[in-house]
Each structure stands twice: as C-alpha cells, then as structure tokens.
C-alpha cells in the first residue's frame, strides 16, 4: 500500500517572491505533484527526488575522479583545508536558509577568510546605492493593496519571477485596487520587447546601457528644467515628458528593478539615480521601490551578514574583524587576482556564471562544494558535501525580496544521510576549532 | 634627514596589508623596530622584514622622513594610509588604497596604481606617473564626504568613479583637486566643490549629480549627460583655488537632475 501525503501552504524556495501557497503531494517520500507553483518552482520541488542529478553521499576526488567517501573522511579533509588556509574564500549562501548563513559568518571568522554571497554578482550594486542614497520601500502587500502605477525597469518578471505579477503587482485585486489589472498602470522600461513589456500599458524602449542618462533626464524634467537635447537614450523628449506626467500624477507608485539596472553599464550608479528619482517623486506623490531579488534567500543572506558583521556581502575577516569593500573582497575579484588558497562554495554554482579567468583560477586550487545537485562547480570540486534541500527537506527561515521573513517547511525527508546546510557547517566549525586548538 | 629604503625581496602570494608603511609609523623608530612592524599577509600576521630589505633610519622629524620603496608592489595595499607628513617614493607599480585618507606629506608613485589611490584624502599631495585604477580620490562605500582637501596628479588615465563625493569649501579654503590625463565614466560624480582637470578625454557621465564644483575637460567627452545645460563660451576659467586656465571652452551648468539651480560647472574644450 502506497502512502500518500498532502501538504498545503508550502513555501517555494526558488525566487525572491517566496510564494507561500503551494500544494505538494508526496507518495512514499517522492514528490508526485506540485500545485500553484510556477514552472521553475515546480521543477525545483521535483528536482529533490532522488535521481542521477542528485548527490546522496559525500564525495572526494581521488586520482582525478570523484569517489564516494564517509561523512567523517570528507568533513575532516574539508576542515583541514580550511584550518590551514591563509586566505580561504567562501561564496554562495543565497539558496539556503538563515541558520546556515549565520554559521557561514562564524566559520569564516574563525578561518580569517573572505565571505561573499551571490548579491555581489546580482543586486549587490543596489545595496551599494542604498548605502549611498537610502531607499524608500515597503512590503509587497502594500503594493498589492495600494499601487496604481507599477514601473518595471530592467526586469522581466514574466520569466524571472513568474508569479510576481499575479500575486502582487498586476492582476491581483487589492484593498484599494478592486479591479486588479484594470486598476493599475504598468510601465516597462527595457531595451527589449520582453513578454512583460508586451503586457504593459507603456513600453519605453531605451538604448542598452543608457539607463543612467534616462533617469537623470527624468529627474531634471521633474524639476521643471527644460533640456537642451531632443532625445535621451534613444527616447524622444516628448515621450519622456509623458512618462514624467504619469509618474507625478499617480496615487501610489512602485519601481521594481532588476539586473537590467544593476549589471549593465553604471551598475550601482543606475540604482543610485533610480532611488534619487523615487525620492524626488515623493515630493509629488507616494512612490516606493523594491529590487527584484533573484535567489529566494539572497535578501536573507544580506540581512544575516549585516546583523552579524555590519556588512551585507564582500566581507574580509583576515584581520579578525570584518571589513567591507566590494571590488576588493568580492568573490570575482578575489578569484581573478588569485588572492585566495581554498574556496568553499555553498548553495551556488559560480563555475556556470563567473568570468572565465575567475573560474579557471578557482579550479586550480582546492575547492569544497556543499551542493545537493550535480553542477559544473560541484563536478569540478575536490570535496562534495551533499545537503538536504532547505525549504523542502528541512525547515528554515528565508527573507522575501521585500525583506519579510517567512518560515519554510519541511515536506519530505532528505535522501540517505544528507544533513542540513547548517549542520554541515556546524560540524566544519567544530573540526576547524579543534585543529586550530581553540 | 631620515632616509629609509625598503626593497621588496619576496613577492607576496596574497595581498599584503601594509598600512604600517608611513612616515608617521616610522618616526622615531630604530631600524629594528621598523623591521618588526606588523603586516598582514592573508590571515597571517607577519613583519615588514619578512618581505622587505630595509636600509637607513627614519629619524625624529616627521617632515624630513623620506621612504623609498622599490619592487613590484602591485599586491601591496594601503601604503601611506593616514600619513600626515614626510614623503614616500614608490618605484614600481603599487596596490590598492595608496595614500588613502592621508592629510599631509607627499607620495610619488613612479608606476601605476591600483584602485582607491588617495581615497578620502584630507590633505597633502599624491602623484602617479603612470595610470591609476578606479575610485581615485573617491569616497569609501556609503560615505557622503569623499576627498576634502589635497591634490592628486595622475599623468595617465584614471578609472571609473574617480573623485566621487568630493567635498570642498571656499570659505574654509579646502580645495580637493584631481588632475588626470584621461578618465573613465562617472568622473566627479556627486561633486560638492571638488576641482577636476582632465587633460585628455573623459568617457561619459562626467560630473553626474554634481551639486557644486568645477570640472574641466580639455579633450572630448564621449557622451554628455542630458541634464547639463549650455551657458555660453569662455576663453579663461578661474578656479576657486586661484588657478587660471586659458583656452576656448564651452561652459555648462549641471547636474540639473540634482537641483534646478545647481552651482556646478562643467567646461569642455571647444
């Protein structure tokens, strides 16, 4: 007799939207149905079932091949590498829960290493801009109930955050937005005609990499300054003026921005200009902004690192106290300049998305990967420690893109003796302390 | 006259945190004391003598101390941090943060400098004969006051976001100044009274978000900010520190994105 289990209101550990209304059906510890989730979230739940893509036992490289070993062997070797390292680097941490992130800070502090999370290649620039010029923001619930103008700039939620528009920003009915979609104006600023742009009421198609110029032109026009130029970033002044009128006359506006701003020319300065625009619009109406965070708990990584060290990412512990400087202590820069001797990658896959020379350097030195699935990083690693998947196989807290903490549930057991990320790191801490004689 | 010479004898594997190399830290110390000054190599606490051959002594008079450093110092960071007098001559490329937050004395780099050279300088002089990296004379993360006084001269190019958040004051006679050969984007971003002279071309977004201050570009600007407005043409510029530059320039006011009545000025060669 097969045992069927139903779970309701499950939180989805995929993107920063952290949908919390999923239904999961389990048959003998195997997920057989996922309801309400988007295609990406569904795929993540199914990926937790044991398959050829999933590690179930710790592995260590022997004569160039990854071979199964015991937990003790793998953990001892990893701890030895970290304890003896003069400049260890730890990167990732955004696709796991907050307890593991808390342990990450402790481990890197003991090792005197560099700690970075995936924000450094995604919304890190947003954080830099926020540190420079502040951030008027609110929760997604407020936007749902109040926002009559939604501006997506350099972000494409239809594909990156598939349920964002139906849960918070477009189709959903809110307290003051009783007609949902019909009660909102959607504006998309994007060089491409994305699927989000196709659904928008207005699409500003600017030249790629000229967002900064457009922001500052809008800001000047908001102040009533007549500009000398006829078009900015390929957008005619007439259209920009039209946009300014819409922005100023809304009741409650919100800017959602994505990597189109943070990872194109200008980076944190694009966001800096964006925030300055929002600040100025608040002299005319109510306007807020929220970054469209990618990984489900990258926001949590920034928050946990900040409350324990003072800084959200790119933290150096080499002098026993935390120091912060993206560009100097960020993972890509550390790898590119060969300023490290061991890497510990947790819940991330830099080998697929870092610059080539950074990856080549990373693979030349010992690499420890804590990762449930086979990825280019883990397949190249010297030690693979397979964890239980947070939010599916163990509980934990994650922060949504608007910095609201949500408790994730456990719906199934991890395969064999896989431990939670925080347990693995806890064991590493114990062993490193022992080796260092602390 | 206290002349002291350091020669790099071993290339560091990781970056070397050498904020202990400054006239202020060497003052009144014997050669042995200087050799035992702490230097961080990764998470290892080592001493100056582990990496440098040391000759000479520093003496007791700060302003007479001259430190000469030789070798490829591209992994050596923070030389001359917080120095308040004396001189440092670096023969070779130097790593990040050279002369950051210094408030007096002079540093000459005969080579290239990495990022953050002269960041948040409060006084003194920093001269780089080669190119400098990003964030020359810039404000550190989250700071609203960057360079407040002093002069940085870079013969070659400076990278992105140089001299951002500069904070000068005519009544207090503080004139932070950057002179560079050419510049990457965001030169003089968020300028509040800094003086910048770019002898060659500047990439884009020059003086963006400038509230007040003077930026002079003697070459061309790749892409002008749309929020600057042309005022007229001038044949001589008088800078607040008294320096005069003659030549035909177009004068712009801006950045109007930050204020409709901005006091910021941008001059571009005609």
Image (cartoon, helix red, strand yellow):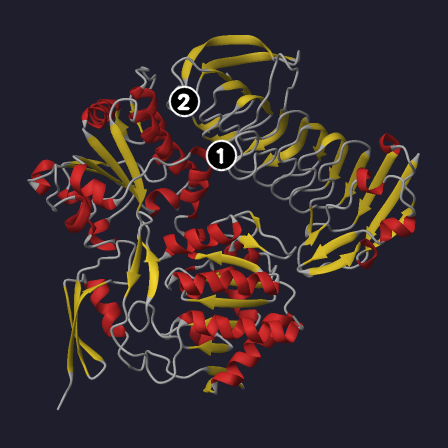
Chain containing mark 2: B
Structural crowding at the residue carrying mark 1, measured as other residues with C-alpha within 10 Å and reported as few (<14), some (14–19) or many (≥20): many
Q: Residue at horizontal 48%, vertical 84%?
A: A71
Q: Secondary structure at mark 1?
A: loop
Residue A432 position in % (x across, y down): 59, 73
Q: Is residue A394 above or below residue A162?
A: below
Numbered marks: total: 2
Q: Quadrant of the C terminus of chain A?
A: bottom right
Q: Which of the two residues, A383 or B154, is positioned nearer the viewer here?
A: A383
Q: Nearer the viewer, residue B33 or B139?
A: B33
Q: Residue furthest bottom?
A: A1
Question: Where does label 2 land, which residue?
Answer: B258
The residue at 31%/15% (across/down) is: A226
Q: Nearer the viewer, residue A27 or A407?
A: A407
Residue B154 lies in quadrant: top right
> On screen, B27 above or below A284?
below
Residue B13, visible in the rendered structure = yes
The Cα–Cα distance between marks 1 and 2, rounded to whole angstroms, is 18 Å
Residue B267 seen by the camera: no
Question: Image point 20% across, 51% down: which residue?
Answer: A158
Q: Residue at x 31, y 73 (%)?
A: A393
Taking A246 as reference, is A316 left or right? right
Looking at the image, is mark 1 or mark 2 nearer the viewer?
Answer: 2
Q: Quadrant of the N terminus of chain A?
A: bottom left
Horizontal and vertical percent position of residue A116 = 49, 57
Q: Do badges 1 and 2 share one subunit?
A: yes
Instruction: Please state the chain letter of the residue tagged with numbered disc 1 in the rendered image.
Output: B
Sequence order check: which comes first, mark 1 or mark 2? 1
Give residue B140's position: percent from left, percent from top. 56, 38
Question: Residue A61: where, in percent of width, then height?
Answer: 51, 82
Q: Secondary structure at mark 2?
A: loop
Residue at the disc numbered 1? B185
């Amino acid at each position: 007799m097969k045992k069927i289990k139903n779970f309701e209101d499950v939180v989805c550990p995929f993107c920063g939207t952290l949908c919390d209304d999923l239904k999961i059906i389990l048959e003998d510890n195997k997920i057989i149905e996922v309801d309400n989730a988007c295609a990406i979230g569904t795929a993540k739940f199914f990926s937790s079932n044991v398959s050829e893509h999933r590690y179930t036992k710790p592995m260590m490289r022997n004569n160039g091949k990854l071979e199964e070993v015991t937990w003790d062997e793998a953990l001892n070797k990893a701890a030895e590498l970290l304890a003896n390292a003069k400049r260890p680097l730890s990167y990732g941490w955004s696709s796991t829960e907050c307890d593991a992130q808390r342990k990450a800070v402790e481990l890197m502090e003991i090792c005197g290493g560099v700690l970075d999370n995936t924000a450094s290649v995604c919304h890190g620039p947003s954080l830099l801009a926020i540190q420079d010029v502040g951030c008027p923001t609110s929760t997604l619930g407020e936007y749902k109930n109040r926002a009559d103008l939604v501006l997506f700039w350099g972000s494409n939620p239809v594909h990156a955050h598939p349920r964002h528009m139906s849960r918070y920003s477009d189709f959903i009915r809110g307290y003051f937005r009783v007609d949902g979609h019909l009660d909102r104006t959607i504006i998309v600023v994007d060089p491409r005609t994305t699927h989000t742009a196709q659904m928008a009421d207005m699409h500003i198609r600017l030249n790629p990499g000229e967002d900064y110029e457009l922001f500052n032109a809008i800001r000047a026009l908001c102040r009533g300054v007549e500009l000398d130029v006829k078009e900015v970033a390929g957008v005619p002044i007439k259209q920009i003026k039209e946009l300014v009128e819409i922005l100023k006359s809304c009741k409650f506006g919100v800017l959602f921005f994505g990597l189109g701003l943070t990872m194109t020319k200008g980076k944190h300065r694009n966001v800096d200009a964006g925030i300055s625009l929002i600040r100025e619009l608040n002299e005319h109406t109510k306007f807020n902004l929220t970054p469209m965070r990618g990984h489900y708990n990258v926001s949590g990584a920034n928050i946990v690192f900040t409350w324990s060290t003072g800084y959200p990412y790119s933290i150096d512990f080499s002098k026993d106290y935390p120091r912060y400087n993206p560009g100097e202590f960020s993972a890509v820069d550390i790898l590119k300049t060969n300023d490290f001797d061991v890497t510990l990658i947790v819940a991330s896959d830099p080998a697929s998305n870092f610059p080539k020379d950074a990856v080549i350097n990373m693979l030349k030195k010992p690499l420890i990967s804590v990762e449930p699935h086979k990825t280019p990083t883990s397949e190249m690693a010297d030690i693979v420690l397979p964890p239980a998947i947070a939010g599916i196989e163990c509980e934990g807290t994650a922060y949504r893109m608007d910095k609201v903490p949500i408790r994730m549930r456990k719906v199934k057991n991890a395969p064999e003796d896989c431990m939670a990320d925080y347990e693995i790191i806890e064991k590493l801490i114990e062993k490193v302390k022992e080796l260092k004689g602390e | 006259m206290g002349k002291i010479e350091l020669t790099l004898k071993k290339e560091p594997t990781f970056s070397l945190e050498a904020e202990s190399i400054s006239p202020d830290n060497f003052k009144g110390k014997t050669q042995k004391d200087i050799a035992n000054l702490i230097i961080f190599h990764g998470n290892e606490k080592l001493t100056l003598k582990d990496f440098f051959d040391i000759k000479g002594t520093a003496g007791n008079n700060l302003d007479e101390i001259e430190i000469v450093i030789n070798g490829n110092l591209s992994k050596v960071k923070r030389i001359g941090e917080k120095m308040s007098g004396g001189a440092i001559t670096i023969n070779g490329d130097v790593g990040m943060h050279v002369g950051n937050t210094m408030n007096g004395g002079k540093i000459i780099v005969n080579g290239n400098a990495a990022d953050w050279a002269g960041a948040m300088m409060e006084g003194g002089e920093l001269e780089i004969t080669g190119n400098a990296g990003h964030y020359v004379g810039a404000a550190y993360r989250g700071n609203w006051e960057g360079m407040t006084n002093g002069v940085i001269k870079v013969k070659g190019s400076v990278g992105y976001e140089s001299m951002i958040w500069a904070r000068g004051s005519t009544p207090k006679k503080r004139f932070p100044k950057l002179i560079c050969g050419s510049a990457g984007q965001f030169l003089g971003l968020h300028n509040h009274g800094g003086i910048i002279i770019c002898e060659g071309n500047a990439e884009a977004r020059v003086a963006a978000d400038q509230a007040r201050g003077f930026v002079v570009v003697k070459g061309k600007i790749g892409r002008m900010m749309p929020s600057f407005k042309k005022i007229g043409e001038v044949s001589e510029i008088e800078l607040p520190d008294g320096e005069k530059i003659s030549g035909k320039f177009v004068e712009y006011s801006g950045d109007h994105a930050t204020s409709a009545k901005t006091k910021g000025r941008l001059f571009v060669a005609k």
